[in-house]
């Protein structure tokens, strides 16, 4: 196995069929590109800009929800 961490497969859990409620959401923040948000950690997921289009495509194919509203909970 190669040590290349720049493969979309390292984000494979992001496009697994969504749980109820889904853990990962595609969040449209109003910026140029959407981001992946992890509801469990209440933080955006750091996805390399080069991989983001492929990760988002796979998430959409798997049925991940998309929202313009903040998908997280209140900060502690």
Image: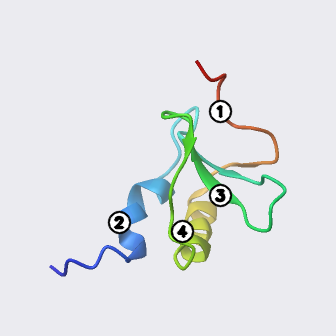
Please report whichever mark, 3 or 1, sits nearer to the chain's N-terminal start.
3
Residue position marked by numbered label 2 in the rendering:
10
Q: Give the CA separation, mark 3 to mark 4.
A: 10 Å
Give x and y (percent) for residue 38.
54, 42
Q: Give the CA separation, mark 3 to mark 1.
A: 13 Å
User: Quadrant where the N terminus lies?
Assistant: bottom left
Residue position marked by numbered label 4 in the rendering:
55
Question: Image point 56% across, 59% down: which residue?
Answer: 62
Element on which disc 4 rests: helix
Please report whichever mark, 4 or 1, sits nearer to the chain's N-terminal start.
4
* Vertical relation: 39 (above or below) 54: above
Question: Image point 53% across, 39% down: which residue?
Answer: 23
Numbered badge on residue 35: 3
* Vertical relation: 30 (above or below) 24: below
Q: Would residue 6 be found to the left or right of residue 22 on screen?
A: left
Give x and y (percent) for residue 66.
73, 51
Please report whichever mark, 2 or 3, sits nearer to the chain's N-terminal start.
2
Q: Would residue 70 be found to the left or right of residue 56 on screen?
A: right
Give x and y (percent) for residue 67.
77, 47
Q: Would residue 57 be found to the left or right of residue 45 on screen?
A: right
Give x and y (percent) for residue 35.
65, 57
Element on which disc 2 rests: helix
* Vertical relation: 41 (above or below) 65: above
Please report whichever mark, 1 or 2, sits nearer to the chain's N-terminal start.
2
Q: Mark 4 near mark 1, Cβ–Cβ under 8 Å?
A: no
Residue position marked by numbered label 1 in the rendering:
72
Question: Image point 49% across, 33% down: which residue?
Answer: 40
Element on which disc 1 rests: loop
User: Quadrant where the C terminus lies?
Assistant: top right
């Amino acid at each position: 196995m190669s040590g290349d961490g720049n493969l979309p497969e390292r984000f494979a859990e992001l496009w697994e069929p969504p749980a109820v409620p889904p853990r990962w959401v595609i969040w449209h923040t109003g910026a140029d590109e959407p981001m992946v948000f992890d509801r469990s950690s209440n933080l955006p997921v750091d996805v390399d800009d080069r991989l983001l289009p492929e990760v988002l495509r796979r998430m959409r194919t798997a049925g991940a929800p998309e929202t313009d509203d903040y998908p997280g909970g209140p900060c502690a």
